[in-house]
Image: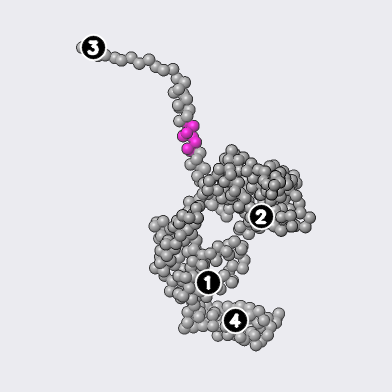
Amino acid sequence: MATLLLMPSGIYYARHIYRQNGKRREKRETLDTKDLKVALRRLAKWKSVNVDNKWGDGEITFDAVATKFIRHHCTALKPATVERYEVSLRQLRPVFDSKLITDIKPADLLNFEMIRRKHSGRSSTKKKKVPVATASIRKDLLVLSSILSYAVMEGWTEVNPVPLFLRKRKASGLTDSEPRRQYLSEEVEARFLAALKRPRKRGRKSLEFQERRDDVMRYAAAIVDLDAGLREDERMSLKWTDLQFGRTPHFAIRETKSGKPRRVPMLDRVREVLQALPVHPTSPYVFCKANGKRYGSFRNGMLAAAKEAGIEDFTEHDLRRTCGCRLLQKHKRSMIEVSKWLGHSSVRVTERHYAFLEAEMLDDIVTADRTARQEREAAAPSAEVFHLRSKL
């Protein structure tokens, strides 16, 4: 039975006490009101969703669980993560909305996978249609798994079939996409940075690089990505208080993907570029416009510079990957050090994304060995050949 509970603050709460697996359980939720009449109306609505559907004869649907999941679970998540959940929910709802949460079986998951495989995915050329990536289908199912795990925790269903389904379907190709391997060599990086600094025209007037605030900021952002390996959100939310230019220059990153702050060393080049940036009198942000508002993204400008530099299939994340590769190859950092530098959740993530460097290193060894052998053969004096005839 659902009852009202008046807290010392004067706010009414809805409360339901029940037994599950022989154990006493209690569920509370604020009704956000101090008015008794309003509280009674909200209690009746709360009871119809949380009590009648959960412990009575009725059963709760996927749509109701997904709505509550977003409202309660996503409040502590970053906006980008919530946006990713909502993208997947747009794919999940047409298939599962009308189904009862207890009726979702592996056959329904397979049906969802087959439907998604018929959809078109993104391609580098807008005119060309390509099948949706298996990694996208897997992400949608992982969001479904999170919702079903939430339903299990709340007692609305007994089992989450998604993890076992994903393990079985892995053999059929339902896996994460292979990590990208593209990073910039020093020569390509020089062309890319030169393209960012190239003179531009505004009307009939040709502006020098230092006169173009947008380009100066974009160039500095590229240097931050290349030398510090920050994620786009981390870089765009940088404040001047996050930059420490003292005896041990470093970035004090507070807004991270994991939510845990981290310290990133600041190399000489990126320190000099950041110290040369104009400081806005009122805005706390490093990358802000002349009016003080923070830039949203430099993606389009970087894509244009990459095209001008002859870099194919470029993404902003290639700059961050370049930083990781330089740390491993040039600065001889360990995987654990690079993992902490880049803010990966574990060293396994780093090993997965940079395993291709080991293969490249082995290829370089083989190529160098072949070249050395060919040079030795070319330098060796030619031997005189004698034909031996057998005597009869």
Q: Which residue is mark 3?
A: 391
Say which label, 4 or 1, has the lower sequence index.
4
Find residue 316 and report its horizontal and vertical position in percent: 59, 50
Residue at image point 54% right, 79% down? 50
Residue at image point 62% right, 43% down? 195
Q: Which residue is mark 1?
A: 66
Q: Which mark is residue 15?
A: 4
Residue at image point 58% right, 65% down? 82
Q: CA distance from mark 2 to mark 1?
A: 31 Å
Residue 340: in sight, yes or no?
A: no
Q: Is residue 364 magenta?
A: yes
Kindly identify the amino acid type of the residue bearing the numbered disc 2.
Met
Mark 3 nearby-residue class (10 Å; few <14, some 14–19, many ≥20): few
Kindly identify the amino acid type of the residue bearing the numbered disc 3.
Lys
Q: Check whether the beta carbons of the residues at disc 3 and disc 4 lie within 8 A of each other.
A: no
Q: Secondary structure at mark 4?
A: strand
Quarter assignment of residue 284: bottom right
Bounds of the magenta segment: 362-369
- Number of the front mark, 3 or 4: 3
Say which label, 2 or 4, has the lower sequence index.
4
Q: Check whether the beta carbons of the residues at disc 3 and disc 2 lie within 8 A of each other.
A: no
Q: Which residue is mark 2?
A: 236
Main structural element of the magenta stretch: helix, strand or loop? helix
